[in-house]
Image (tube, grey):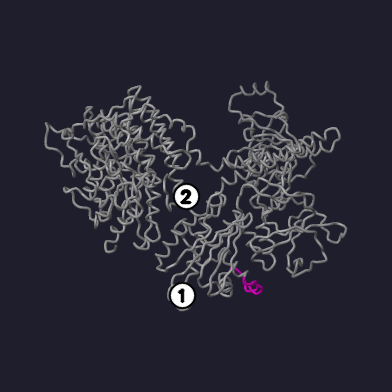
Amino acid sequence: MADFGSESSEKKEEFFSEAQEIVDGLGKFLLDLEGAVAASRVDPDVINEMFRAVHTLKGIAGLFGATRMSGMSHELENMLDDVRMGRLDLTSNVIDLLFKAVDLYTHILLFERGEAPDPQQEIAKLLASFAAVTQPEEAPTSNIFTQFDLDPGMFGVLTEYEEHRLKSNIESGLALFRLRVRFNLTVLDTALEDLKKKAKPLGEIITYLPAPSTDESDFENLELDILMASKSDAATIDTTLSVEGLVVNPVKRRSGGGPPPKAAAAPVSKSPLPKIGAPPSLPPPTIAGPARLPQDLAPESHAAHGAKSVRPAAPAHAARTSVAPQAQGQAGQFVGKSAAQTTVRVDIRKLDRLMTILGELAIVRSAVGRLAERLRGSVEHRELGTDLHRLHRTFERQLGQMQNGILEVRMVQLGPVFDKLQRGLRAISREYSRPVNLVITGQETEIDKLIVEELSDPLMHMVRNAFDHGIEIVEDRLKVGKPEVGTIALNAFQKGNHVVIEVEDDGRGMDPKLIIASAIRKGVITEDESREMSARDAYRLVFMPGFSTKTVVTDLSGRGVGLDVVKTNIAKLGGIVDVTSEVGIGTKMTITLPVTLAIINVLIVEIGGRSFAIPLASVEEAFVYDPSLTRNVEGREVLSLRGQSLPICHLSSLFQVDAFDDASDSTRKFYVVTVAVGIRRLGLLVDRLEGQQDIVIKPLGRSLKSVHGFAGAAELGDQRVALVLDVAAIVEEVLAGDQSRFLAMAGEGRA
Amino acid sequence: MRRVLIVEDSNAVRTFVRGALEDEDFQRAVGGFDVLEAASGFEAMALMPRGPFACIVTDINMGDINGLEIVNFVRKSEHHRETPVVIISTQSSSRDIERGLSLGANAYLPKPFSAVALQDVVRQLVAPGEG
Amino acid sequence: MADIVRSPGRDLRRANDGGKRIEYLAFTLGSQIYAVPIQHIAEILKPPPITEIPRAPRNVVGIISVRGKLVTVVDLRRRFGLVESPFDRRTRILLTDTGDDEPIGLLVDEVRQVYRLAEHEIEPAAALGGDQPAYIFGIGRQDDALLVLLELKALIES
């Protein structure tokens, strides 16, 4: 089995998924090939693609220590090489062997995953069959190229295969052309595909060579020399390809034999490269101690590796004698169970659609539940009701499992985002010669894929901010007795239904007085407003539009944004940013995000006869409201709860809906739902608690984007739609309004 | 910031090479660099203006623009001619490797190779004074 | 679409008059008849329960769910500054489909019929006198009826 050693499971997955993709592709090519052979119209490109696919497979199998796979690929590659070079005919026997090989690959992949027995015997049998079909005679090398006046600079860079294609085209009597074309780099892909498509009916493009004469100060264009074999003439090629600026030059045919072209290397040399280092005729590679180079340090490699001799003296097959027609046998039975089934790439919109269906199913579930209750309540159908009730419970449980299953699929680890940050910070650190260490914990924490995609820019900005404004220059650090190398810590962990990400530095910290002074100077706040400000209020000022001292262009995003944009973007994800700091010690910014955006468990409450949903992730507790425990602090109702003050928000007045929200009516009960976001808590006063429910949250339309305080809405069943509170926004809005107007502005300003 | 360019059409090999080159100890030893990836010869050509590179690591057998052409381009280029080039390829294309070296590649590594082998080669090429 | 009264015979006859004809769906608000190009109306709904949105713009009645999608409902009476009227059995919601904009529900008193108008049967909005808002693009006259023709995009976006 493959020994991945310390390789991460991600790399391993990368290996499996690419290997499986290649094997699947091979299967497809083979089917095409079989049809083409039957019609005797084989496209050399298809064979070359297969060769390259196996070549790649061998390469990655070797890197990942999958020795069975690299061993078989090695022999298969040789066979395909013989086919593409015209040394071996594509007989039905050869095609059979190729099919067997593809089947066996699937088996091998399963084995590498530990899901199938070792296929070594089958491999040995198949390899023996390979050896039996390989034709022993080496194709004679004729110097057919001397017929043409080929530019040695162009000829010298052909791969062996390209050289072979050139040869067979010349042998078929086609003329050669050299095309010069200039493409804009931004449209290179499409322009090239277009060119290939148009060129195909005319003949074969042998190679594309970036013209060495390309003007290198021209970053927008790429000039290419194209070598093409065609039965048409230059004028036809020119008009058919119809590319602007195209120059078509026929490669002149020499009269008579003429001297061979002065290629940089002997073009037809077939000698295998000596094991290590350079052949005597070549300039030695300019690397010290070439003997250390290739194989010595290579991992334990497959049997055939290193023992390669001039083919086709059959490679070392242990079981050469047993050329078995049943070679496919066992491998065949694994065909249906492809290893690809264990990794699929899914468009996240498909998951969203499943989630919506699940939401509808949940509605059916509640309807069935109600029906069961009704039946149980009736005398004559009680038994039926009990049965239905039991069924309903099973349905409910399995629906829950399905929901968790779909959610799990959406989850990805934060690791790759953190890696990106690490690279980014390393670059900045070097650029400014200010050494800093990024210490990462919790990279395995999982979060909704959609959230991850939106996280890397804001996080990069925060890391960059910690570096720019936190970490001191070396002299300053040494002066206060800090280690020379600064530290920025990135910690992630799950906390209930939230993921918390902290960006912490051991830098100079933030001085609330300086922040306030700076904010007044920039006109972000007035002096009056500044008087009542706590340290926490001051820290929050750094997220105000217009506060950022400099807008930073991050290397990753290429856009300049202030911290206010960071805050807005995090808020869009349903998250919130908090700051704590200590002068001389450091600063910590904390992002709190929901784990997923798709489905949430909510508490349904009633306010003024209307139902609203509060995400349970933000709910700490709910209790009966006791007006006698409240007092008024600077215009704000505050409830004393277990020795702590809890600000109270009357949702009915915040939302301007009529309610029985008359505290003087002592006969009516109201409820307080305590919500918490980050470390801020708020008591929401509601008329009634209706219960909990899982909902699929849907965004409000663009026409309602100016409406604050709602994260979206959800169907509750029986055609009812309830608004889902954006708790973070409400906490922000209400508490911000508390102390000074400017923070209310921040509340207004959020999306 | 110095940069290394990987030209390789296999995702897995690119990931492997990137992993080897971004290894922290290795980066510390060679003074650190960024890794740029090209999944084809054309992508590599598009990235060329972002050089100079401390080193280019390239596969040979790629469609369209092959690795030999990359080597050739680099050696003839005004801006890149001094850049060390490492060929990574399988032994079966020995004729191509040979040609790559004669075109001016500095070293080749037969696939499969270990991360350490690659690091050794690159270290010697990018910082001749060390190691 | 059961509410739409079509008169195919008459429409066919008109279609032969020459010139391009566009179909308009007519509806009433109070005593006035309005019409919108029918290709921009995806569906006509009997009003389901509507969820009010606190602090929403005044013209917005609320949101409804149409087969799992949330749709914002705009009261055209409020939009045009008319007195609001309670829902009755003829009240309908027209679900718009203008392509790029999000679908919007337009609350109307009653859906009437489909008219096919040729260009020469449409007068400019100025015929109503004074400055007319951008969402009124013309006046159609048919069978003694005066149709105020509405431009949905302008209506929704403003």
Q: Secondary structure at mark 1?
A: helix
Q: Where is residue A285 drawn, in percent x and y?
A: 22, 53
| Front disc: 1 or 2 | 2
Q: Where is residue A469 drawn, in percent x and y?
A: 50, 69
Mark earlier in primary sequence (1, 2): 2
Q: Residue at x 60, y 66 (%)?
A: A540
- Please indicate, yes or no, whether residue C123 appears anywhere in the rendered image: yes
Q: Secondary structure at mark 2?
A: helix
* Drawn side of residue A499 relative to residue C45, left or right: left
Label 2 is placed on what type of residue? Ser
Distance from disc 1 to disc 2, alpha carbons, whole Å, reads 39 Å
Q: Residues within 10 Å of mark 1 (few under 14, many from 20)?
A: some
Instruction: Check chain identity for marks 1 and 2: say if they share one.
Output: yes
Q: Residues within 10 Å of mark 2 (few under 14, many from 20)?
A: few
* Drawn side of residue B70 relative to residue C142, left or right: left
Q: Is residue A200 above or below residue A533?
A: above
Q: Is residue A485 above or below residue A249?
A: below
In the image, A511 versus A238, the foreground residue is A511
Return the chain for callout 1.
A
Circle 2 residue: A9
* Range of magenta residues: A524-535
In the image, A134 versus A735, the foreground residue is A134
Is A452 within the magenta?
no
- Please indicate, yes or no, whether residue C158 appears anywhere in the rendered image: no
Quadrant of the drawing holding the C terminus of chain A: bottom right
Return the chain for callout 2.
A
Label 1 is placed on what type of residue? Arg
In the image, A473 versus A188, the foreground residue is A473
Circle 1 residue: A477
Quarter where residue A621 is shown: bottom right
Q: Where is residue B117 drawn, in percent x and y?
A: 32, 54
